[in-house]
Image (cartoon, grey):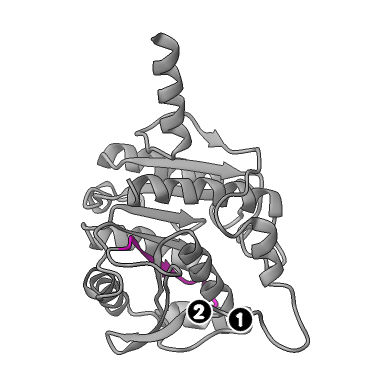
Amino acid sequence: MRRSLLLLWMGALLLGACVRGGAREVAREPSPTGAVSEAEFKALHTLRADAAPPRRGQEVEVAGTKMYLSLPEGARAPVPGVLVIHEWWGLNEHIQHWADRLAANGYAALAVDLYGGKVATSRDEAMALVKSVDAARAQEVLKAAHAFLQQDPRVRAERTGSIGWCFGGGWSLRAAMAIPELDAAVIYYGNPVTDVDALATIKAAVLGIFGTKDASIPPETVAEFRQALDAAGVRHRILEFDAEHAFANPSGGRYDERAASTAWHEASAFLEHHLKR
């Protein structure tokens, strides 16, 4: 009996259940999961002379802005929904491939556009776009996108989550702060919020994924974020990888396939636990 209970407890951890507090957690072993493996996802971003690999979703308009909706093949409502929030480059093909990847795992993935249709091709352009974002408008767009996932007849999501990277990681956290109906939020190396009162509005479970070599979000900042989540009573799990910022983007120069593979395994298990149970 005791052995059975132990196995059940271990199983819950593997499903990505969140905990309050705890020691610093570092994931080490890669474990690709889901319908699109890390190797396949990496291959989607291989530069080609002719064209980018085909995408499977479609453009939709929500709150006066274009978004990218990718649905599971043959899915029938209700389908769990995920808000997909772009990096500082904007809603480019990389993020659309992420939406397709989530759709392959059984989610209605709606990639939002917080730049009003603009996509950066240089760091200077990306920084200018980040600075141009109106926080109130961005929050309005995210709320409208969430309502779309709940109301669109193809989706009618009963459980919803958010996921984002870098700029989008920060906004995935802020979406959880602004949308109490969210059940889960995944934050890939996004700028954290450490105001306890602001974090206390979160009802979702939070998964934070960071790199210990990230100069913009050092381990000390991650530790402050963890402590603030503890104080706010937010269910959370924080993972730190021996990697740099943007390590999960195969189209970038700091991509780390090993860390990205393990991070995706953790993120997909987390979403499945909170959105498909």
Task: Find the distance from the CA under tag 2 to the CA under tag 1.
Answer: 19 Å
Q: Is residue 23 above or below residue 4?
A: below
Q: Where in the figure is residue 188, as x and y percent of width and height?
A: 50, 56
Task: Give the side of residue 111 with respect to residue 95, left or right.
Answer: left
Q: Is residue 211 visible?
A: no
Q: Is residue 253 above or below residue 5?
A: below
- The label on residue 134 is none
Disc 2 is placed on an element classified as: loop
Magenta residues span 79-89
The residue indicated by pointer 2 is 90
Instruction: Tell me the mark number nearer the camera, choosing from 2 and 1.
Output: 1
Picture quarter with the C terminus: top left
Residue sitting at 37 percent across and 48 percent down? 206
Residue sitting at 23 percent across and 62 percent down? 179
The residue indicated by pointer 1 is 54
Q: Quadrant of residue 230?
A: top left
Q: Quadrant of residue 82?
A: bottom left
Q: Is residue 33 above or below residue 94?
A: above
